[in-house]
Structure formats: structure tokens, C-alpha cells
Image: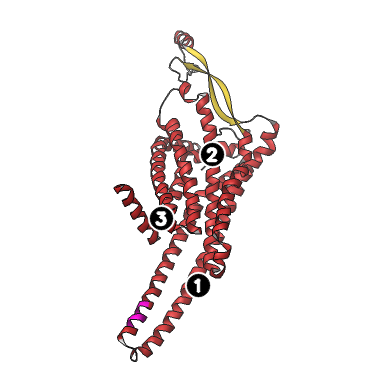
């Protein structure tokens, strides 16, 4: 998620450079009207889906390295979505005066939301890449799978992601703060525009019914170090380390994995063809029982091929959805460093606030839920778990 960027309104000193047109601003304004309800719906659905994943994948008979990683992913996603619900209600759904919206308490919560959301999202990305590595090893090196992807190493990888990612996001923590501003508000706590008032009497009346009110926002710390090295480091870490490198790694791993799966399918097809020819030659000499046994073996081979096809399609879906979500954010973050702050303020912020959250959440609950739906064992356990909880 882009919480760290969407909530920090001034990460770069504003300098003239490349700017997006007013059409993007119009798009952002129109989209903001549905963003609150859309994000709330996605979060609620995602919380339910990830809770079901955790309940089923943590069962004793479902424990495996892959399911352990999926559980770690589900926990990270669940934390993000639970935390985003009050943020969406506060900022998009619960319409209040500025005086009540931008209080110190809510500003502290927004600062926490920015940091916490980015950390959990980074953990999710890290575990997604880990899952791709584990799957590639399982398919490409099955003889080494139990050694390289043991339960112990899987636990280390998951715990390592939960410990390393908060450290990776340190530049975000030290470059943002809650800062106070004084604004002129009317008696209802709303904005007052004194510049367009032509009637002097109405101007005096309006001015006499206003108060100087202290509001609180999440901003970038105003220090030379933050405005320079740390600020640039923050964007490089966000765009390259957290976004682009995982996209490249997952792309390479997924392509290699799909190639290995297709090669295995081709080998199995050749072996099956050879076996069928041999079976046809011996069929006349075989008894009915032997023929049934051979038919069962052939059916098992067909089931394996279908499972390979399902896995291949699932991996392609994961790859495309992950790239669709993460790659644009990484590219936009990188362009913010290269093209300057004007691009960030006029292009990146508009897009980030408009579409990135839905892309992120849609991708992750879809991947986690659909990935498990491809596993018939998971579906069976899920039905049993739901029945058990309903009857209990």
C-alpha cells in the first residue's frame, strides 16, 4: 500500500518541472467520491477471506512450508485491512468539520497508519517472493526440496521478513512527523474564503465570526538532512528496493517456474505415450484386473497433467496481478526522484490516492483466496472448518 506517500503531503520541496494536466485532478476528485465505500468493502471482504485462510492453513494436517508462508501472508494482509478500516471511515466516510477531522489524536493515528501499513505491505511483498522461490525449488529441484525448504528454514524466512521489513522502512519513520498549522475557520469549524468576498460588511461579519484554530497534519521533517539525503533515500528504497526489485525477481522466478512445469508436462506426455503403446501390445495378454490397474495409472497421469495446468495458470495470474499492482507504484516512485517534486505533487499523489489501494487489496485477497481455491485439500478443510464453527 502507499500509505507512506498518500498521507505525507510534502515529501519533496516543490520545484517546477514535469507536471500532469488537470484531467488527472478531475479524475482524482471523481474517484475520491467512491474510494471510501470501495475501500471499506474490500477491507471487510479481505478480513473475512484472510481469517478463513488463517483458520484453515494453521490446522495440524495442513501444515507445510507453502501453507506456512501463505499463513504469514494472510496475517500481514489482515493487519493492513483491519487498520485501514478506521482510516477510511475517518478520512472518507465520516464527514466532519476540519476542526474535528485534523485533531492531534487523529494526526498521530494517520502517522501510525502510514508507517504500519507500509511495513505490513513490505512484509507481504517479501513473503510473496519467498513463496515463488519455494515453489521453484519444489518443482525444479524436487530431490532437494525437503532439505532446502524445510520447516525450520521456512520459519526462519517468515520471521526474518517480519523482522527485516520494519528495519528497511526506518527512513520513513525518521522523515515524517506530526506538525501543527493555524487556519482561519468559521464557528462551525469549516474553511473560510475571505479573498472572494466583495461586500465589506459581509466581510467584517464573516471575519468577526472566525477563529484561529490549530490543526495537525503529517508532514516531512524540515531539516536539511531530511530534505536532502534521507528524503532521496526514502524514495529509492520505496521505488527500487520495495517495488521494482521484487517485481523483477518474481517475474524471473515465475517465468522459470512455468518453463519447468511445461517441460515436466512434456516429459510426462512422452512417457505416457510410450506407456500406452506398451500397454496396447500387452493388453491382449492381460487379465481384466490388470487392465483396470493400468487404466487407473493412466487416469492418475491425466490428473497430474490437469494439476500442472491449474498451477501454471495460477502462477501466471499471480505474476500478472502482482506486476499490475506493484510495478506502476515503483515506476511512479522512481520518476518522482528523477523528474522532481512537481511530478510527485501533480502526478504521483493523485494516482496514489485514487487507485493504488484498491489495486493492492484486490490483488492480495484475490491471490490468497484463489491460490488456495486451486488446492482441493484446502477447500475440503475450509468446508469442514466452516461446518465446525457453525455447529459449534
Q: Quadrant of residue 32?
A: top left
Depicted 182 relative to depicted 251: above or below: above
- Numbered label attached to residue 263: 1
Q: Earlier in the sequence, mark 3 or mark 1?
A: 1
Q: Quadrant of residue 182?
A: top right
Q: Find the distance from the CA under tag 3 to the CA under tag 1.
A: 25 Å
Residue in the image at 68% along x and 30% along y: 223
Please state which of the two labelled residues, at mark 3 or mark 1, is closer to the viewer. 3
Residue in the image at 36% along x and 87% along y: 280
The color scheme shown is secondary structure
- Numbered label attached to residue 370: 3
Please name the residue that numbered disc 2 is placed on.
116
Residue in the image at 54% along x and 39% along y: 116
Locate residue 55, reporting x and y percent: 41, 50
Depicted 354 relative to depicted 290: above or below: above
Out of 228 and 87, give the one closest to the viewer.
87
Amino acid at each position: 500500500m502507499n500509505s507512506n506517500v498518500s498521507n505525507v503531503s510534502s515529501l519533496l520541496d516543490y520545484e517546477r518541472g514535469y507536471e500532469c494536466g488537470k484531467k488527472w485532478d478531475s479524475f482524482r476528485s471523481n474517484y475520491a467520491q467512491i474510494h471510501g465505500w470501495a475501500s471499506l468493502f474490500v477491507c471487510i471482504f479481505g478480513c473475512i477471506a484472510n481469517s478463513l485462510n488463517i483458520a484453515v492453513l494453521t490446522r495440524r494436517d495442513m501444515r507445510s512450508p507453502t501453507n506456512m508462508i501463505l499463513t504469514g501472508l494472510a496475517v500481514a494482509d489482515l493487519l493492513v485491512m483491519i487498520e485501514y478500516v478506521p482510516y477510511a471511515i475517518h478520512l472518507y466516510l465520516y464527514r466532519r468539520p476540519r476542526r474535528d477531522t485534523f485533531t492531534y489524536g487523529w494526526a498521530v493515528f494517520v502517522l501510525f497508519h502510514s508507517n504500519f501499513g507500509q511495513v505490513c505491505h513490505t512484509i507481504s511483498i517479501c513473503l510473496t517472493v519467498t513463496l515463488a522461490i519455494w515453489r521453484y525449488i519444489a518443482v525444479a529441484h524436487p530431490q532437494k526440496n525437503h532439505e532446502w525448504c524445510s520447516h525450520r528454514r521456512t520459519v526462519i524466512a517468515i520471521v526474518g521478513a517480519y523482522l527485516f521489513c520494519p528495519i528497511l522502512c526506518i527512513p520513513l519513520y525518521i522523515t515524517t512527523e506530526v506538525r501543527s498549522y493555524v487556519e482561519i475557520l468559521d464557528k462551525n469549524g469549516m474553511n473560510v474564503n475571505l479573498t472572494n468576498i466583495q461586500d465589506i460588511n459581509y466581510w467584517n461579519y464573516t471575519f468577526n465570526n472566525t477563529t484561529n484554530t490549530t490543526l495537525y497534519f503529517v508532514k516531512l521533517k524540515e531539516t536539511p538532512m531530511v530534505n536532502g539525503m534521507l528524503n532521496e533515500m526514502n524514495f529509492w528504497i520505496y521505488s527500487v528496493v520495495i517495488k521494482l526489485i521484487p517485481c523483477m525477481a518474481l517475474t524471473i522466478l515465475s517465468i522459470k517456474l512455468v518453463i519447468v512445469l511445461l517441460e515436466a508436462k512434456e516429459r510426462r506426455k512422452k512417457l505416457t505415450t510410450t506407456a500406452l503403446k506398451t500397454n496396447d501390445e500387452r493388453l491382449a495378454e492381460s487379465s481384466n484386473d490388470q487392465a483396470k490397474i493400468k487404466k487407473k495409472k493412466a487416469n492418475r497421469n491425466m490428473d497430474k497433467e490437469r494439476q500442472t495446468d491449474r498451477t501454471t495458470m495460477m502462477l501466471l495470474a499471480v505474476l500478472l496481478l502482482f506486476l499490475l499492482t506493484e510495478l506502476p507504484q515503483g515506476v511512479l516512485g522512481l520518476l518522482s526522484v528523477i523528474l522532481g517534486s512537481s511530478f510527485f505533487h501533480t502526478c504521483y499523489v493523485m494516482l496514489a490516492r485514487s487507485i493504488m489501494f484498491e489495486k493492492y487489496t484486490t490483488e492480495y485477497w484475490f491471490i490468497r483466496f484463489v491460490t488456495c481455491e486451486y488446492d482441493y485439500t484446502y477447500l475440503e478443510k475450509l468446508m469442514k472448518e466452516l461446518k465446525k464453527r457453525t455447529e459449534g
